[in-house]
Image (cartoon, grey):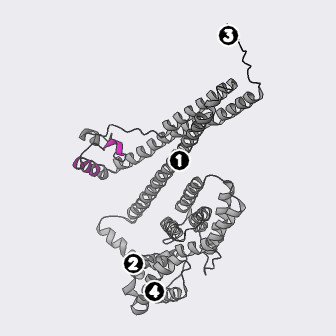
């Protein structure tokens, strides 16, 4: 199986793209935002429970995939579909059968009613209903009701929805110590409010919202907008949200890859520094007694030094001049999203420039595109040097070991004793 961080990055990209492009817009609750919140909750509870790294990875992968089954267009048995999607993804990334089993267990554990069989399944169950024990409960409840009406086709009244919520909260329990300590008290408070207050006091009125939507054509006509224009504006807003999400995912991915490159370079530097210290402290003293060791020792030292140099080149920072002019901002020549372009400027100048950029949509998007592009350029440079360093290390190490083997096989040169004259 591939590197853990890389696998998690690919899982996030795959699941996010599937949810954004395949899940119906009438799904209001089980959105990408919900998935991201479940992943964040899993990380928080996992830190509290102090689970093993492999279990943590399986938990987070399961969290990213647990609602991808909504991409089929219906909610029925979406957990089973999500498990199938995750299995196909993991098979492409050479995951072990044991790891796949853990991920499947996490996804299937989210099926109602919850019946987790181990710690990570308990964590994802609590994370999936994390909102019950937070101040976001009322808003999430409203979104879920909208989803049931628009996507599920259920015609629930406010009274029925309130009774369902009360029954659900009374039957629900948190499994982890974190959930019982942090979330359960808040959930019980919400339950008490549901029992004491009228439905209209505890949540927005979806029925009234639907009525207003029916009256919208008249209101929009006062503004001079046709129904087609209203639909176009709504579509543009959804497109804007999708673009922002894509930019965020791309940026996170490139930052993760950059961290991985730095980590690989640090490993190479550390390993070769250790090899150099061992060679200098032990083998150099033996060169006087065995001249056959000269070539392999010099070869190994040269390889280590070159690898360290390329590893340093891969991680060496490169900072720009750090200034810009008003003309640069007006002509949209400066990317203010990169610190190297503004770190020498005063705060008032930077504040003015940022406001100018944010007021210009094209300039803002252009800056984001440039930021992602130059991150990619830096990544390409890093991985180019890393590839060279790893190739030198691999082939140089093999060559050095062969040289050492020959040095020990060949007989040591015999010194001819010359008697004093």
Please name the predominant secondary structure of the magenta segment in the image.
Answer: helix
Q: Quadrant of residue 82?
A: bottom right
Q: Position of residue 412 (x, y in %)?
A: 74, 24
Q: Which residue is mark 3?
A: 420
Separation of disc 1 and disc 3 at Cα? 61 Å
**202 to 136, vertically: above or below:** below
Q: Nearer the viewer's eye, disc 3 or disc 2?
A: 3
Q: Is residue 417 above or below residue 379?
A: above
Q: Are marks 4 and 1 in contact (CB under 8 Å)?
A: no
> Circle 3 — which element?
loop
Q: Which span of residues is magenta-colored?
A: 338-355
The answer to which quarter of the image holds residue 407 is top right
Q: Closer to the camera: disc 4 or disc 3?
A: 3
Expressed as whole percent of the image width and height from the top left, the position of residue 345 reads 26, 44
> Residue beneath label 4, please?
188
Which residue is tagged 1?
Answer: 263
Q: Earlier in the sequence, mark 4 or mark 3?
A: 4
Magenta stretch encompasses residue 354? yes
Cβ atoms at labels 3 and 2 below 8 Å apart:
no
Instruction: Name the residue at the front extreme.
Output: 421
Q: Quadrant of the C terminus?
A: top right
Between the residue at mark 2 and the residue at mark 4, the CA separation in whole angstroms equals: 28 Å
Disc 2 crowd rating (10 Å Cα; few below 14, some 14-19, many 20+) is few
Task: For marks 1 and 2, give the CA distance.
Answer: 52 Å
Pick the residue in front: 254 or 307: 307
Q: Relative to 402, is 64 on the left or the right?
A: left
Q: Where does the image place residue 100, in percent across and percent down from the top left?
A: 68, 63
Tag 1 near tag 3, CB within 8 Å? no
């Amino acid at each position: 199986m591939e590197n853990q961080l890389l696998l998690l990055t690919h899982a996030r990209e795959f699941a996010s793209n599937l949810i954004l492009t395949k899940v119906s817009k009438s799904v209001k609750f089980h959105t990408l935002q919900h998935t991201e919140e479940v992943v964040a909750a899993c990380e928080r509870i996992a830190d509290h429970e102090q689970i093993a790294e492999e279990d943590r990875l399986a938990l987070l992968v399961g969290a990213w995939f647990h609602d991808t089954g909504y991409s089929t267009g219906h909610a029925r048995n979406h957990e089973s579909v999500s498990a199938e999607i995750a299995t196909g993804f993991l098979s492409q990334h050479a995951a072990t059968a044991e790891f796949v089993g853990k991920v499947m267990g996490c996804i299937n554990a989210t099926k109602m009613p919850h019946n987790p069989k181990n710690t990570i399944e308990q964590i994802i169950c609590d994370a999936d209903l994390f909102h019950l024990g937070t101040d976001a409960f009322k808003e999430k409840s409203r979104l879920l009701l909208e989803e049931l009406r628009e996507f599920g086709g259920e015609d629930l009244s406010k009274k029925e929805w309130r009774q369902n919520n009360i029954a659900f909260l009374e039957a629900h329990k948190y499994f982890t110590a974190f959930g019982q300590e942090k979330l359960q008290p808040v959930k019980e408070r919400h339950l008490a409010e549901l029992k004491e207050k009228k439905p209209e006091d505890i949540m927005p009125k979806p029925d009234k919202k639907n009525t207003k939507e029916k009256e919208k054509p008249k209101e929009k006509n006062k503004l001079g907008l046709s129904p087609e224009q209203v639909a176009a504006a709504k579509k543009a807003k959804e497109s804007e949200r999708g673009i922002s999400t894509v930019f965020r995912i791309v940026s996170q991915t490139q930052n993760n890859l950059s961290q991985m490159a730095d980590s690989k370079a640090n490993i190479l530097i550390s390993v070769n520094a250790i090899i150099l210290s061992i060679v200098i402290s032990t083998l150099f003293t033996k060169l006087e007694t065995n001249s056959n060791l000269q070539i392999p020792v010099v070869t190994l030292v040269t390889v280590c030094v070159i690898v360290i140099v390329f590893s340093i080149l891969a991680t060496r920072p490169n900072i720009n001049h750090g200034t810009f002019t008003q003309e640069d901002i007006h002509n949209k020549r400066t990317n203010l999203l990169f610190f190297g372009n503004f770190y020498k400027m005063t705060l008032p100048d930077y504040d003015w420039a940022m406001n100018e950029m944010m007021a210009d949509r094209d300039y803002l998007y252009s800056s984001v595109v440039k930021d992602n592009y130059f991150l990619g350029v830096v990544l390409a440079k890093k991985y180019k040097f890393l590839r060279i360093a790893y190739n030198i290390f691999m082939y140089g190490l093999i060559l050095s070991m062969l040289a050492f083997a020959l040095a020990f096989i060949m007989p040591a040169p015999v010194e001819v004793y010359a008697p004093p004259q």
